[in-house]
Image: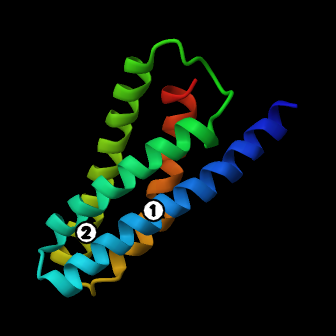
Amino acid sequence: MQSREVLAQILRFGIAGGIATLLGAATYWTCVNYTGSGPLLANLFGYLIAMVTGYLMYSRWSFKGHGRRDNPVRTTSRFFLVSLVSLALNSFFVWLLMTALHGPNWWPVLTMVFVTPVVTFLLNRQWVFR
């Protein structure tokens, strides 16, 4: 039963996180390519979109029924800290891949889609929504 619950959470998190991540990455891409924003500022805008979208979907759907919800301040503040980890990871990858390695604009999108979601799932499941 436990493994089915975890698999269902991974699937829901993947869908919700995919939507939030794609919105964040699309915001980043649009800002970098069409508004003249610098990569790190564009990443911040993408982060804000993904954070709000993610919190709503994770708390109401992905981890619905998982853990306690008796202290919404604790849950929300922990989610915000995990989202800052997400911002830091994405900012690091933007800096590394675009500034240090002089890569193209699309390189950081790969890490935003494939690395950061794994880290945030583990933190959300084990610490935020437990």
Label 2: element kind: helix
> Which of the image's four quarters has the N terminus?
top right
Q: For the point 17% across and 66% down, which residue is it? A: 40
Residue 129 location, x and y as percent?
54, 28
Residue 29 appears in which quarter of the rendering?
bottom left
Residue 8 appears in which quarter of the rendering?
top right
- Label disc, if present, on residue 110 of the rendered structure: none
Please tell me whether residue 27 is drawn above or below residue 9 in the rendered image. Answer: below
Q: Amino acid at mark 2?
A: Val
Q: Count up the numbered dots.
A: 2
Please tell me whether residue 113 is drawn above or below residue 16 in the rendered image. Answer: below
Q: Residue furthest top?
A: 70
Residue 7 location, x and y as percent?
76, 45
Q: For the point 27% across and 87% down, which residue is it? A: 104
Instruction: Give the crowd class for mark 1: few <14, some 14-19, many >=20 residues within 10 Å.
Output: many
Circle 1 is placed at which residue position? Answer: 21
Instruction: Give the crowd class for mark 2: few <14, some 14-19, many >=20 residues within 10 Å.
Output: many
Q: Is residue 102 visible?
A: no
Circle 2 is placed at which residue position? Answer: 94
Please tell me whether residue 75 is drawn above or below residue 108 in the rendered image. Answer: above
